[in-house]
Image: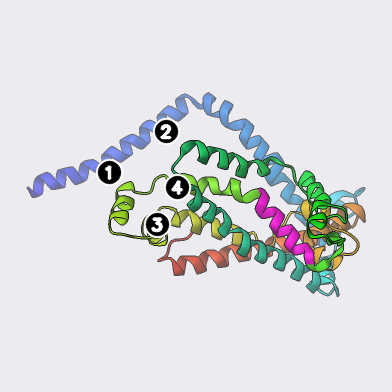
Amino acid sequence: MKTNATAVSKQKPDTKQNGLHSVLLYVTQHWQLYVIFLLPALALTLVFKYIPMGGILIAFQRYNPIRGILGSEWVGFKYFERFLSSPDFLAYLGNTLKLSIYGLLWGFPMPILLAFLLNRIERTGLKKKIQLVLYMPNFISVIVLCGIVRILLSVTGPINLLLGTQINFMTMPEAFRTIYIASGIWQGAGWASIMYTAALSNASQELKEAALIDGANIFQQIKAVEWPAIKDMVIIQFILQAGNIMSIGFEKAYALQTDLNMRTSEIIATYVYKKGLLDGDYSFSTAVGLFNTVINVILLLAVNKIVAKMNDGKGL
């Protein structure tokens, strides 16, 4: 018996080595196929992802477009110090964090709740029609969405007509965050619920039927049967979204921005856009953008560690 076990244990490494050798042999014999199919993707990745990373050096230089990156004067952390010592730094950072955190707290649970609600609909035709209505806003561009929001909230818009008021919501700094977050939920919650709805379809129907027989209510069914089916996906999505707290695109904030709501609508992304493209201060805007990216990476790693500790070592 021992001899047979030893022979089997010796055969396993040999089998793995033979399999690896076969794969390498196949790749070397058909390398042209791999070059044809992989080269375009690698070229696009290098050109549009890795080569532009060299532009980070601009943040440490007094960049001159004529001299280029190699010929510009090196100034070190001058522009980082300028941004951090700016009187507006805390205001821009606070606006960015508030908009992101509030958006995460209100927006993240919505797709999950929608998925749970859609999963309770048993009529396939009705479920598909509701899903179609929920998914449609995702295909509206950000600028068109902002135009719709401006029309709805204008002084003569439907909201004011319904309330019987003449309030210009777009000029109210205290209303900007609510408008931004609510419009984002309306646009993206339905589309984001797709992955959770798909995961819920894998939930055990036998357990669900057993829970119904035992007299479990809706919340108990969700807790015992449906939640375990999407738990890992929820954790991954939460880590990714929490790690991107500082990554708010400037398009929507800039499109909803007015001169009167700047107190809450001016975030780091819009500040970088204005300084870099409108004012031509390339080095300073690059430094601010790099600062934003570094904070994002730190947050992503921190959230991943925290969630992993709270979830028995399971993170990204």
Q: Amino acid under label 3?
A: Pro
Against 171, residue 66 (above or below) is above
Of 43 and 235, nearer the camera is 235
Of 298 and 254, nearer the camera is 254
Among numbered discs 3 and 2, the one appearing first in the sequence: 2
Task: Name the residue carrying label 2.
Answer: 24
Task: Name the residue carrying label 4.
Answer: 199
Task: Name the residue carrying label 1.
Answer: 13
| Front of the two marks 3 and 2 | 3
Against 202, residue 224 (above or below) is below
Among numbered discs 3 and 1, the one appearing first in the sequence: 1
- Circle 4 crowding by C-alpha within 10 Å: few under 14, some 14–19, many from 20: some
**Picture coordinates of residue 177 (x, y %)?**
75, 63
Which picture quadrant has residue 223? bottom left
Q: Amino acid under label 2?
A: Leu
The reply to whether callout 3 and callout 4 are in contact (CB within 8 Å) is: no
Please give the name of the residue rendered at 68% of the width and 40% of the height, measured from the top-left corner: 139
**Picture coordinates of residue 32 (x, y %)?**
54, 24
SS at circle 1? helix
Which residue ends up furthest to the left in the rendered image? 1
